[in-house]
Structures are given as structure tokens and as C-alpha cells.
Amino acid sequence: MTTLEFVVVAACLAIGYKYTSALLGKRDEPAPDDRPLDTTPLFERPLPWHEVLGVLPEATHEEIVAAYRTRMSQYHPDKVANMGEDIRALAERRAKEINAAYAEACAVRPA
């Protein structure tokens, strides 16, 4: 390898490193509209109340109550009290989600 080839390869590596590090460094900057990026994994983000209850957003109060009772009958922690710890933890988490969705739905669609 000649000296000229060595210099060209070294220059290309330096330029490539500069641009790559500049591009990777910009990932830590805030969004252009100055809002922080939501880095919560998609599967951990809370669902809207109507998706948790399994109704349309325009559902009536009666439909919301019926959906709440149906979901709670499926996921109530007392129904799985004699099962494994993982299943009980899942039922408790889902029951909390359902209760929170029902409270939000009642605030949006009062009786």
C-alpha cells in the first residue's frame, strides 16, 4: 500500500467517523417541537379506556357498566386466588387497569 492510498483511507475513515458520530449524537436531542420523546415501550403504554373495556368511544353509560362487569368477571383477582403467583399478579394488574378505565369512562360519560 502506497503512502497516498494510506492517506486516502485514513481520511475516509476520519470523515466517516465524524459524520457517524454526529448522526448518532443527534438521537439524544429533543424532538423539533421541544416535546420529550415517549420512550416507554409500546406494550407498557396504557390503553385508552374504551379499548380496555372493549367498547366504542361513543358507548353509553349502560354499555360501559355492562362491559366493566364483564371484564371484571373475567379478571377479578378472587377468581384466581388459588392459582400461581404469576396468574394472580396478572389478574391484579388487569383489574387495576379495568378499574382505572371505568373511572375514566364515568368521568367522560356521566350517568
Image (cartoon, grey):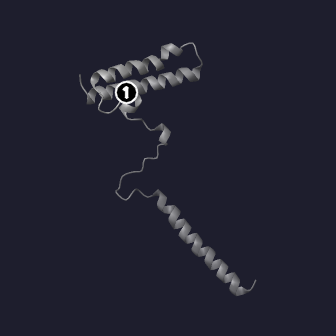
Label 1: element kind: helix
Q: Residues within 10 Å of mark 1 (few under 14, many from 20)?
A: some
| Image quadrant in which the C terminus is located | top left
In screen coordinates, is 60 left or right of 97? left
Q: How many marks?
A: 1
User: Compared with residue 67, is residue 6 higher up or lower down, i.e. above or below?
Assistant: below
Q: Which residue is mark 1?
A: 100
The residue that appears at 29% across and 21% down in the rendered structure is 62
Residue 66 lies left or right of residue 79; in this view the side is left
Q: Nearer the viewer, residue 54 or 5?
A: 54
Question: Which image quadrant is residue 59 in?
Answer: top left
**Residue 107, image quadrant:** top left
Q: Nearer the viewer, residue 64 or 104?
A: 64
User: How far across and down, in percent of the image, does residue 64 sit?
Assistant: 33, 24
Residue 69, placed above or below residue 17: above
Residue visible at 58% across and 16% down in the picture: 83
Quadrant placement of the N terminus: bottom right
Residue 73 place in picture, x, y as percent: 44, 16
Taking the view exactly as shown, the residue that stands out farthest to the right is 1
Callout 1, which amino acid?
Ala
**Which residue occupies 53% across, 14% down?**
81
